[in-house]
Image: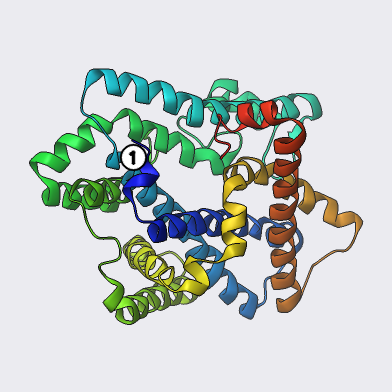
């Protein structure tokens, strides 16, 4: 049974809207590299913007993506060896292959040109080795934003473990995932654990048949809670930097922010936005290709102008980078869909919708 038939049309549209919106967030997070590349000193007002928007609001893309992935996956999950084998083959095609493909392309660019601007260079490649750059183990992959796919693939491989936990100790399992995320050191691990809580939460919602629209009556309090959490973590980062307790503020901001963002999609102006829905079909391709496009746009900026000072210049520059990167990647996706659908299908693991 198709997964989308198991959710209401309204919920399905909200997922599609989030797919587009969260990819915009991903691009927006990495657009800050443009500021880091050209600004020698960041004004206080611009720093405040960076703390609130890219560092916190935009980074909701990760927990929301993990939550949706876990939820949709476990709606149709079957705990059999045969189903597991088919699932692994499918996820290898749709997740692992695109992950390896775009890492390999970036590694090739580094080998040919000695660097990929703002992504990596030949010295780092020689130091860590091609295999680590390709697989992203014990370090970020060559296309570092793709670490999400690496972790997601690992979670799919561990699907039976999440399933058993959700059957035997569902709520205790959620608490355990929270504790692992909060307190287990990430240093020295082959992959991160930042998505484990949200992936399992999605699994739990699917397994228990939770009504995803059941909190609609708490929309205003939920959004207010998210704003309070955002204000708290932004205050700590802006005035104190990253003290030892910062991660507690940040990670709970991700929890409450995820709730607030989901509640926001309950409003038709966002959750049924025709514009965002029209872009959802190629959003995965945009995610795969945005990093090299964004990095080369930042590199090319030096030939046009130098954004070296000013708050509004910095905000405008990041917004322009985000919009232009998203537009170029979307245009490339649509050109491939029309004129080279086989290439698009291979690049995205046959994800064309």
Residue 170 appears in the figure: yes
Q: In the image shown, does 227 or 67 lie closer to the viewer?
A: 67
> Which secondary structure lies at badge 1?
helix
Which coloring applies here? rainbow
Mark 1 burial class by Cα count in 10 Å: few <14, some 14-19, many 20+: some
Q: Which is nearer the eye, 250 or 351?
A: 351
Q: Position of residue 130 (x, y in %)?
A: 60, 22
- Please determine whether, in this image, residue 211 is positioned above or below residue 349: below
- Left or right: residue 21 versus residue 108 is left
Which picture quadrant has residue 145? top right
In what quadrant of the picture does the N terminus appear?
Answer: top left
Q: Is residue 51 above or below residue 325?
A: below
In the figure, residue 316 lies in which quadrant?
A: bottom right
Residue positioned 35% across, 60% down in the render: 251
Where residue 211 appears, as percent x and y from the top left, is 24, 60
Provide the residue designation for mark 1: 73
Q: Residue at x 62, y 45 (%)?
A: 282
Q: Is residue 136 visible?
A: no
Kindly identify the residue that appears in the image at 24 percent across and 19 percent down.
81
66 left or right of 321? left
Q: Nearer the viewer, residue 113 or 346?
A: 346
């Amino acid at each position: 049974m198709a997964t989308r038939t198991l959710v209401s049309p309204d919920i399905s549209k909200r997922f599609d809207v989030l797919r587009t919106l969260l990819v915009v967030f991903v691009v927006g997070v990495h657009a800050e590299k443009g500021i880091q590349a050209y600004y020698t000193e960041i004004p206080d007002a611009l720093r405040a913007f960076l703390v609130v928007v890219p560092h916190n609001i935009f980074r909701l893309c990760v927990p929301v993506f993990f939550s949706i992935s876990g939820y949709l996956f476990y709606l149709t999950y079957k705990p059999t060896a045969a189903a597991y084998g088919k699932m692994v083959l499918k996820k290898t095609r749709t997740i692992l292959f695109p992950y390896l493909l775009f890492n390999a392309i970036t590694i090739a660019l580094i080998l040919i040109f000695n660097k990929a601007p703002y992504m990596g260079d030949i010295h780092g490649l020689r130091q860590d080795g091609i295999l680590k750059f390709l697989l992203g183990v014990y370090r970020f992959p060559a296309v570092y934003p793709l670490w999400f796919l690496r972790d997601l693939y690992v979670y799919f491989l561990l699907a039976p473990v999440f399933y058993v936990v959700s059957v035997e100790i569902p709520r205790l399992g959620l608490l355990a995932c929270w504790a692992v995320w909060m307190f287990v050191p990430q240093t020295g691990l082959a992959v991160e654990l930042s998505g484990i809580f949200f992936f399992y939460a999605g699994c739990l919602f699917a397994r228990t048949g939770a009504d995803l629209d059941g909190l609609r009556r708490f929309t205003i309090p939920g959004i207010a809670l998210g704003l309070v959490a955002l204000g708290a973590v932004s205050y700590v980062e802006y005035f104190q930097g990253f003290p030892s307790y910062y991660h507690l503020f940040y990670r709970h901001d991700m929890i409450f922010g995820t709730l607030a963002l989901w509640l926001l999609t309950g409003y038709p102006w966002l959750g049924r936005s025709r514009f965002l829905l029209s872009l959802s079909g190629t959003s995965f391709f945009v995610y795969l290709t945005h990093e090299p496009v964004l990095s080369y746009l930042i590199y090319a900026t030096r030939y046009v102008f130098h954004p070296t000072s000013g708050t509004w210049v910095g905000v405008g520059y990041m917004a322009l980078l985000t919009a232009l990167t998203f537009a170029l990647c979307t245009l490339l996706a649509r050109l491939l869909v029309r004129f080279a659908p086989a290439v698009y299908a291979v690049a995205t693991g046959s994800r064309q919708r």
